[in-house]
Image: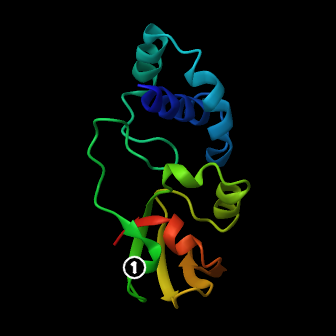
Amino acid sequence: SVVRRHRLAERFLVEVLGFEWWKTHEEAERLEHAMSPEMEQRIQNVLGDPQTCPHGNPMPGVMGRPTKPLDRVTPGITATVERIPDQFEHEPGFLEYLDSQGLRPGVDIVVIDLRHGEPIRVMVDGTERTIRADCGQKVWVRA
């Protein structure tokens, strides 16, 4: 599927070509349409059958882990950033903003303060950060 080729292309760009995880979406858009079934299979083999794209979204057919939006986490709880849903990859500068705040899939965070519609205070790698309120719906975590 196109979604599978896109996510494989993103993973290839990060793991083989060294792209930053937040820069892959547009490049993958170009590659997904040029990828033959043989190339898709070879990329999958080189990558070791990845389960997710760099943004944490599961490959088609792979059951992802249960997640919820960050704004549904109880303050004081440690949560792991699991994924940034596809629809937010298109938002100019959003993934780069998350990266600048240390928020990327696989990172553990602690929610310090969370109030609807207000910036969210979190602890990331031992540093307290205040992130934009919209991150509450756009960053999905496992808690």
- Left or right relative to 14: residue 71: left
- Left or right relative to 96: residue 37: left
- Left or right relative to 66: residue 40: right
In the image, residue 56 lies at what x, y percent? Answer: 45, 50
When the figure is inspected, residue 111 is found, relative to residue 99, above or below; the finding is below
In the image, residue 98 lies at what x, y percent? Answer: 64, 63
Identify the element where label 1 is drawn. helix
Color style of the picture: rainbow
Q: How many numbered callouts?
A: 1
> At x 40% / y 73%, what residue is drawn?
79
Please tell me in which quadrant of the rendered image residue 132 appears.
Answer: bottom right
When the figure is inspected, residue 38 is found, relative to residue 24, above or below; the finding is above
When the figure is inspected, residue 32 is found, relative to residue 50, above or below; the finding is above
Amino acid type, mark 1: Arg
In the image, residue 48 lies at what x, y percent? Answer: 38, 27
Please tell me in which quadrant of the rendered image residue 68 appears.
Answer: bottom left
Image quarter hosting the C terminus = bottom left
**Label 1 crowd bin: few (<14), some (14–19), many (20+), radius 10 Å:** some
> At x 65% / y 59%, what residue is drawn?
99
Q: Nearer the viewer, residue 62 or 118?
A: 118
> At x 48% / y 54%, what residue is drawn?
85
Please tell me in which quadrant of the rendered image residue 45 appears.
Answer: top left
Q: Nearer the viewer, residue 102 or 3?
A: 3
Image quarter hosting the N terminus = top left
Q: Which residue is mark 1?
A: 72
Q: Nearer the viewer, residue 127 or 5?
A: 5
In the image, residue 104 lies at what x, y percent? Answer: 55, 58
Q: Residue furthest right?
A: 93
